[in-house]
Image: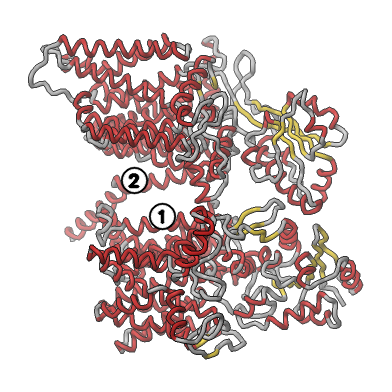
């Protein structure tokens, strides 16, 4: 991390922190500071995006963004400086209180420090160098989902992707909540490479999630310990699979040393029996929009909860604006908050909810419409995966599925909500919608995406589970032992998976992600081709053109394109035609406005090209006016702009 | 109207008070200290010792560390740095992070002594620790000294607390701190000696104060000078007597000295009559009796377990590295090898700078402002010789004497003397504040002077630490400091290898002679093939294998004569340093002007001086050599546009001399 990056991060925190003084909400200093990280990221990302669109992605536009926001927000802070000073003095006084005091800031500080250390560890091993000068990765999340995220971030950082188009499908609109990747891209002009930019943005937002969850959960539970239980229940979720797979299969086979080299994920088995992955390893890191989405969701709930009695309209407006901005960052949180708030508004039928809904819908719906995929990905079904995969459609499998995937989360959450106060009950009831939705419909092309609703249920129901565990715990005696057993049942699988994520050499990892030749060709393309160039390249999971340069390509990985509603099959066939020089390949190049064709090891492997094929394709392309502009270390790049 | 104005005035005054409140100043200091310690932390090329520390830490992380060897000092910082590597990754910055963290925590040490220092003195001392050029430099230096100083300071804090208000847990904390210090550096022997003798003098003071009708209080000058005068003088004399004998002779002489002191203490106790109601300020015996037997036993058990854990690589390896300096098992090495090594070093003569006044000269060069303020503190200590004041005085001046006596005189040891001097300066600041705060005008003048001095110190600190850090015109730079060319060549080798591998499917063969291998051992840690070579007159097999790149020191250039035809040769500077004559060869009063101009120019813009007479001329110089690169490799590098001309690194263009 260089000086500019450090200054940028500090500015983000300051921007977000001072933003909290634009509303009259009674948040303590530490909450304003931690919430400020997420709010600052959202503000900087949105304004930075608009300015970069107007000018370009550069250090100057980032300085302008930060400067404008700091100036504007400092006015809020200055106007309410007496509150700010009082908050600060209150923090100093409360610092002396004991850990279990509800007003003590010690627990969130501890959570922030520990989550920062763990996140840093997981992120710093994400990428590594290889002997050949390439790049190795250490987790599935980085190997898999991050390939697409790298392409998105790189498209902004290096390829001036404005107005945004999907870089992995030339010519398509960016039907994805790319906010977090754009935010990562903002670090590149400050001197970081794209890998470090991804890592550092994840560390920043991943570190603040636990304290934010703690602040949110604390409002629905009786004491600090229950809030910490709730937090652990969410972050270390993962069902009960490890009890069998680890204790009865892996541990007896390998002995205790297996803990230093866990062979597999326990919460997730590749969509066979286990579909609901751990919140951290399956959702927070690989699916990067959740880094902002989960936190923003909790912040909005806290704001609405704090405002439920005083009903200050500016707070509703602020929360509404925040929700309205979410489709850019995490569309699921946007939908979840709209669903929840609609229920709350309908049950109260008060006009002040208009202050919330007006900005939320005015800002959010246009973005939603813009992101809406061309292809309809909805379908209806019953009981989610039951009757599919290796699950049967019967009562036993129904119970077994939920026990294996979520443990006792659902019954304890229901019990907790039933036993809570009327006010909390009203607040909590709509969260069951997130259990109902995945069981009746696919809204997002693929059945696996329905796990995202379950994880939202877990996120929102965790305080009620934590409270029930705490009630048992403080009863003492046998009940205390029961609560400990319950906690182990809820946390064991997730703990193993999170522990595994911190291990650099577990399972097949680290694996080579890019070879030295890949990196060289990526660097050359970055330096020597225009930022609006479009490439024909293999649509494998990783490819240097996509992940290192963010240049537009005919097709990225088919699975990820399918998720976004893109017709991946026709693009795949077109690429095949181009590389096999089938008749009409020239028209295909023209249709996708391809400027460069890459021929490297991945293309040869993926399209089954024969040995010495480079001579054949070279002759053909050059014959028609293409130029060989790069020929090094198993890679050729042809400039096909002047082809006839 | 008048009420409104007075309200506004009141509010404004309150706001000013908030901004200048101690807490706000401490928050600002936190930011300043963190910035000065973390900013561009990895930028300066690694010193030889830093690279070894980082490399050993990495070995521990990879399970390849062989155990404690006093040549490389204690293992604790390898464990801690390995933990930092595990969390934050292996990098130049993280290799220095432990030192930076320890240096940052040290800033807060005066807070624990705020009752003794006073609030202004505390903030003053904290400010000086935050910005002092030397404190900052060695908080950014990846050796163990910053961490060791933190533990020494913790020891002193506990030592004073134990004597003033003994608690049951104090022995555990004290003994554990000593064990932790043992696991960092052998200098703990000096600390134990220093504070052991102080304990004897405190006991002597206590005994003298019991003499009926002759209490120490009746002779205030004797009271104030017993420790800070007589004690320090005796310490100096005894160390002159001990000399650089080393081994058993040193032990016998020091034992005689301590025995004599003990004899005097016991004698006075036995033959003096005590006033019945006499209550001395402190009582060593009373303090020792305060913890009960159980608490003493627990403290011994905990200290022993800590010792075993630290020296057995956390209970995993009880055999030592089996080297000449650590020939025994892990635990015995921990107990004895350190002392033996130190003792041998002591008897083999000076390492580092050979001049006895080295530390004094360095302190005057870099920290004269602090020394000047500390004079006020010493005045206060003489006036009020409390236990705290005397202990700090002993720590500072005793440390100066002991470290000046010890054979090894290195720049990084200055901080062990400087920190207590800063605490004394804190006492001085409080003293000045109490004197001037009664008069507004005096207060304003004092504040203005303080501000000017602070700006000067901060300017010096920034110059030393950020304006060409590690360049040899800084006296803090020691002979092991690598030049920027080392980093330039490292980057060149990595980049070249990437292209070379992609083109040829094999890695570059790089061979670096063992004489100039460090810090490449650290920088090229990820290089896929071995780069270590021992090239001597009798061993030229490495050269015969014609590696792609070869690094040779200047004294081995003749071995590479056969390489001339196939290789491009680049002149190379590996390390650099400056060992000036502090008096610049001053011999007569006529040289005064030159001397002052030399020092003035150095303080102002770090221009090194040439000695007025004598040889060597005193200019910074470098360990030079050659880099030999195969013509074919060079031509490929140029063709593929990856040749960055590392031999033309800007800071070395001036050539071998900076004068």
Spot occupied by residue B489 in the image (x, y as percentages of width and height): 70, 40
Q: Chain of mark 1?
A: A
Quarter residue A160 falls in: bottom right
Spot occupied by residue A79 in the image (x, y as percentages of width and height): 33, 65
Tag 1 secondary structure = helix
* Relative to B92, residue A1 above or below: below
Q: Chain of mark 2?
A: B
Query: Dot 1, how many residues are within 10 Å of its Cα: few (below 14), some (14-19), or many (20+)?
Result: some
* Relative to B3, residue A604 above or below: below
- Residue B431, numbered circle: none
In the picture, the quarter occupied by the C terminus of chain A is bottom right
Q: Answer yes or no: is residue A390 visible.
A: yes
**Is B309 or A398 nearer to us in this picture?**
A398
Spot occupied by residue B366 in the image (x, y as percentages of width and height): 47, 28
Q: Is residue B433 left or right of residue A179?
A: left
Residue at image location 33% in from the left, 79% down from the top: A414
* Relative to B586, residue A259 above or below: below
Where is mark 1, residue-wise? A113
**Between marks 1 and 2 in the image, the one whose residue lies nearer the viewer:** 1
* Relative to A117, residue B260 above or below: above
Query: Dot 2, how many residues are within 10 Å of its Cα: few (below 14), some (14-19), or many (20+)?
Result: some
**Is A39 or B199 nearer to us in this picture?**
B199
Spot occupied by residue A464 in the image (x, y as percentages of width and height): 32, 73
Where is mark 2, residue-wise? B25
**Is A556 or A445 nearer to us in this picture?**
A445
Quarter residue A39 falls in: bottom left
Give how far apart the Cα atoms at labels 1 and 2 are.
24 Å
Q: Are marks 1 and 2 in contact (CB under 8 Å)?
A: no
């Amino acid at each position: 991390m260089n000086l500019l990056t450090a200054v940028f991060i500090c500015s983000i925190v300051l921007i977000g922190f001072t933003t909290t003084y634009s509303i009259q909400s009674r948040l303590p200093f530490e909450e304003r500071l931690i919430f400020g990280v997420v709010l600052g990221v959202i503000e900087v990302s949105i304004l930075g995006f608009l300015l970069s669109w107007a000018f370009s992605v550069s250090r100057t536009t980032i300085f302008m963004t930060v400067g404008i926001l700091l100036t504007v927000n400092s006015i809020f802070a200055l106007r309410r400086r007496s509150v700010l000073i009082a908050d600060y003095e209150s923090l100093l006084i409360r610092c002396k209180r004991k850990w279990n005091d509800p007003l003590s800031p010690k627990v969130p500080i501890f959570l922030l420090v520990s989550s920062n250390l763990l996140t840093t560890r997981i992120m710093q091993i994400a990428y590594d160098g290889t002997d050949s000068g390439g790049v190795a990765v250490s987790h599935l999340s980085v190997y898999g989902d991050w390939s697409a995220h790298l392409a998105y971030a790189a498209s902004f950082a290096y390829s001036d992707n404005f107005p945004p188009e999907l870089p992995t499908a030339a010519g398509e609109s960016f039907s994805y909540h790319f906010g977090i990747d754009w935010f990562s891209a903002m670090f590149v002009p400050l001197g970081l490479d794209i890998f470090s930019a991804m890592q550092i943005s994840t560390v920043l937002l991943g570190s603040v999630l636990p304290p934010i969850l703690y602040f949110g959960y604390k409002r629905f539970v009786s004491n600090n310990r229950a809030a910490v239980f709730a937090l652990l229940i969410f972050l270390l979720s993962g069902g009960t699979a490890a009890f069998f797979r680890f204790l009865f299969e892996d541990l007896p086979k390998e002995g205790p040393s297996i803990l230093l080299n866990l062979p597999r994920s326990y919460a997730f088995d590749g969509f066979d029996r286990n579909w609901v992955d751990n919140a951290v390893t399956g959702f927070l890191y690989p699916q990067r929009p959740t880094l902002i989405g989960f936190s923003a969701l909790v912040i909005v709930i806290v704001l609405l909860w704090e405002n439920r009695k005083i009903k200050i309209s500016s707070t509703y407006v602020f929360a509404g604006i925040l929700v309205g901005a979410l489709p850019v960052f995490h569309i699921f949180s946007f939908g979840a908050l709209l669903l929840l708030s609609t229920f709350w508004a309908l049950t109260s039928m008060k006009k002040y909810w208009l202050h919330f809904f007006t900005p939320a819908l005015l800002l959010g719906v246009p973005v939603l419409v813009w992101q809406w995929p061309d292809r309809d990905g909805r379908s209806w079904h019953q009981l989610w995966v039951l009757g599919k995969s290796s699950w049967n459609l019967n009562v036993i499998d129904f119970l077994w599925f939920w026990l294996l995937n979520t443990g006792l989360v659902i019954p304890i959450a229901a019990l907790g909500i039933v036993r809570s106060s009327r006010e909390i009950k009203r607040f909590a009831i709509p969260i069951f919608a997130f259990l109902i939705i995945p069981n009746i419909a696919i809204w997002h092309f693929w059945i696996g995406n329905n796990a995202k609703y379950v994880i939202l249920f877990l996120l929102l129901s965790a305080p009620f589970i934590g409270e029930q565990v705490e009630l048992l715990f403080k009863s003492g005696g046998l009940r205390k032992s029961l609560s400990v057993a319950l906690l182990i049942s809820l946390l064991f699988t997730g703990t193993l998976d999170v522990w595994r994520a911190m291990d650099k050499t577990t399972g097949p990892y680290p694996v080579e992600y890019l070879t030295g030749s890949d990196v060289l060709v990526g660097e050359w393309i970055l330096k020597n081709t225009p930022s609006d160039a479009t490439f024909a390249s293999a649509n494998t999971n990783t490819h240097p053109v996509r992940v290192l340069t963010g240049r537009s390509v005919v097709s990225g990985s088919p699975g990820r394109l399918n998720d976004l509603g893109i017709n991946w099959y026709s693009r795949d066939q077109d690429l095949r035609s181009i590389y096999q020089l089938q008749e009409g390949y020239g028209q295909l190049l023209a249709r996708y406005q391809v400027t460069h064709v890459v021929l490297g090891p991945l293309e040869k492997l993926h399209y089954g090209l024969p040995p010495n094929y480079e001579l054949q394709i070279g002759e053909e392309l050059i014959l028609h006016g293409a130029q060989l502009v790069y020929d090094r270390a198993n890679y050729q790049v042809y400039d096909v702009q002047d082809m006839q | 109207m008048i009420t409104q104005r007075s309200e506004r005035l009141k509010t404004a005054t309150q706001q000013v008070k908030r901004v200048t409140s101690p807490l706000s100043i401490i928050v600002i200091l936190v930011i300043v200290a963190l910035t000065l310690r973390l900013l561009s932390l990895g930028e300066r090329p690694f010193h030889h010792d830093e690279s070894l520390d980082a490399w050993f830490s990495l070995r521990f992380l990879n399970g390849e560390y062989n155990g404690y060897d006093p040549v490389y000092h204690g293992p604790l910082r390898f464990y801690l740095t390995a933990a930092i590597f595990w969390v934050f990754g292996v990098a130049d910055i993280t290799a220095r992070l432990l030192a930076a963290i320890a240096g940052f925590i040290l800033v807060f040490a005066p807070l624990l002594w705020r009752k003794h220092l006073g609030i202004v003195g505390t903030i003053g001392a904290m400010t000086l620790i935050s910005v002092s050029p030397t404190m900052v430099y060695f908080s950014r230096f990846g050796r163990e000294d910053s961490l060791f100083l933190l533990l020494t300071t913790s020891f002193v804090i506990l030592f004073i607390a134990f004597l003033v208000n003994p608690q049951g847990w104090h022995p555990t904390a004290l003994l554990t701190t000593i064990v932790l210090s043992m696991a960092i550096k052998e200098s703990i022997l000096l600390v134990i000696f220093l504070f052991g003798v102080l304990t004897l003098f405190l006991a002597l003071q206590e005994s003298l104060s019991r003499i009926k009708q002759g209490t120490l209080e009746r002779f205030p000058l004797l009271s104030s000078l017993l420790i800070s005068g007589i004690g320090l003088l005796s310490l100096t004399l005894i160390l002159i007597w001990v000399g650089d004998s080393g081994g058993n002779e040193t032990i016998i002489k020091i034992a005689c000295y301590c025995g004599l002191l003990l004899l005097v203490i016991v004698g006075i106790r036995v033959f003096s009559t005590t006033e019945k109601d006499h209550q001395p300020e402190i009582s060593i015996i009373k303090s020792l009796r305060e913890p009960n037997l159980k608490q003493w036993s627990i403290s011994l058990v905990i200290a022993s377990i800590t010792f075993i854990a630290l020296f057995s690589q956390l209970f995993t390896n009880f055999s030592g590295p089996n080297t000449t300096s650590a020939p025994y098992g892990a635990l015995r090495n921990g107990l004895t090898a350190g002392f033996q090594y130190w003792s041998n070093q002591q008897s083999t003569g000076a390492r580092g700078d050979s001049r006895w006044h080295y530390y004094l000269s360095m302190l005057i060069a870099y920290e004269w402002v602090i020394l000047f303020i500390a004079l006020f503190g010493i005045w206060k200590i003489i006036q009020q010789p409390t236990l705290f004041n005397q202990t700090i005085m002993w720590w500072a001046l005793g440390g100066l004497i002991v470290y000046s006596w010890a054979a090894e005189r290195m720049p990084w040891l200055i901080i062990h003397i400087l920190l207590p001097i800063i605490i004394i300066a804190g006492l001085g600041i409080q003293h000045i504040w109490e004197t001037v705060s009664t008069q507004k005008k005096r207060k304003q003048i004092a504040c203005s002077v303080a501000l000017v001095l602070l700006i000067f110190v901060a300017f010096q600190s920034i110059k030393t630490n950020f304006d060409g850090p590690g360049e040899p015109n800084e006296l803090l730079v020691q002979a092991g400091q690598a030049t920027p060319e080392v980093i330039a060549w490292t980057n060149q080798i990595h980049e070249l290898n990437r292209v070379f591998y992609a083109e040829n499917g094999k890695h570059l063969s790089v061979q670096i002679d063992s004489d100039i291998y460090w810090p490449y051992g650290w920088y090229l840690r990820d290089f896929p093939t071995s780069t270590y070579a021992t090239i001597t007159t009798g061993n030229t097999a490495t050269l015969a294998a014609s590696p792609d790149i070869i690094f040779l020191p200047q004294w081995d250039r003749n071995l590479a004569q056969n390489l001339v035809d196939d290789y491009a040769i680049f002149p190379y500077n590996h390390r650099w340093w400056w060992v000036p004559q502090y008096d610049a060869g001053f011999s007569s009063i006529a040289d005064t002007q030159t001397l002052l101009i030399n020092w003035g120019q150095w303080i102002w813009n770090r221009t090194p001086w040439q000695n007025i007479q004598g040889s060597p001329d005193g200019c910074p110089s470098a360990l030079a050599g050659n880099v030999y690169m195969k013509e074919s490799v060079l031509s490929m590098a140029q063709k593929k546009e990856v040749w960055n001309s590392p031999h033309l690194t800007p800071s070395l263009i001036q050539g071998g001399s900076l004068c």
